[in-house]
Amino acid sequence: MSFAVVARFAKLIALIGFMLPWVLVSCGHQPAAHLSGIDLATGTAITGDVPTAGQASQGHPDLWIAASLLLVIVGLAAGLLLRGSRAAAAMAATSAAALALASIGVWRIASAYPAQGSDASAVVQAQAEYGFLLTCAGLIVCFGASVAWLSGAPDRSLSATGPTAG
């Protein structure tokens, strides 16, 4: 499998990760809301002082995560439409930038829910979930494969003629 295929597939995995839960908001160690990357990018917000399940409404989009989603889409399109080193450079650049933007966005959300009060049952917390981790992993793999593709590193797969007799 070529580095180009690995990079494109990894970018697609990163895009799929946006549809999965990115952030879990909990209150008193009870899950209150799961928000996907798309929810965060489009502005789904939790209403009220203490969130409860089902209390999500349209709020302000997280611009860091929205920009990250946009870069993932642009990078995937560039990887499919461009050829050669231009495609590899576009995939690497958009992967690195999208990873940085997504990380900043999730960090800002997690820091927006600090521990409140001395009663541990009333603490509202936000933490990253598997969709965010899948997106990050896809972007890291895409970046690595794109750099290898850009550097012209030889693929370790078998050639079309098969292994050589030795």
Image (spheres, rainbow, N blue to C red):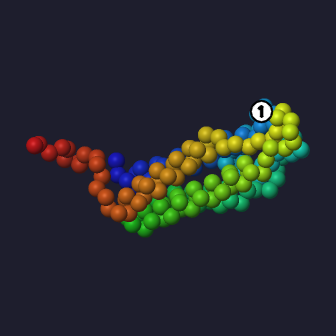
- How many numbered tags mark residues here? 1
- Could you say whether the residue bearing mark 1 is in a helix, strand or loop? loop
Q: Residue sitting at 43 percent across and 62 percent down?
A: 88
Q: Which residue is situated farthest in the right direction here?
A: 48
Front-most of residues 89 and 27: 27
Q: Quadrant of the C terminus?
A: top left
Q: Is residue 140 left or right of residue 100?
A: left
Q: Please determine whether, in this image, residue 117 is positioned above or below residue 58.
A: above
Residue furthest left in the image = 166
Q: Identity of the amino acid at label 1?
A: His
Instruction: Tell which of 65 and 125 is nearer to you.
Output: 125
Q: Position of residue 161 (x, y in %)?
A: 19, 47
Residue at the outermost front position: 118
Residue at left offset 50%, top offset 52%: 140
Residue 101 position in % (x across, y down): 63, 59
Q: How far across and how far down the image is residue 144, in percent?
A: 43, 55
Residue 165 visible somewhere in the drawing: yes
Badge 1 crowding class, 10 Å Cα cut-off, few under 14, some 14 to 19, many 20 or more, is few
Q: Considering depth in this image, is 139 or 121 the residue closer to the camera?
A: 121
Q: From the viewer's perspective, tell me whether residue 135 is left or right of residue 144.
A: right
**Which residue is identified by label 1?**
29
Point out residue 53 in the picture as x, y percentages from the top left corner.
81, 35
Relative to 94, residue 10 above or below: above
At horizontal 63% and vertical 54% (from top left) the residue drawn is 103
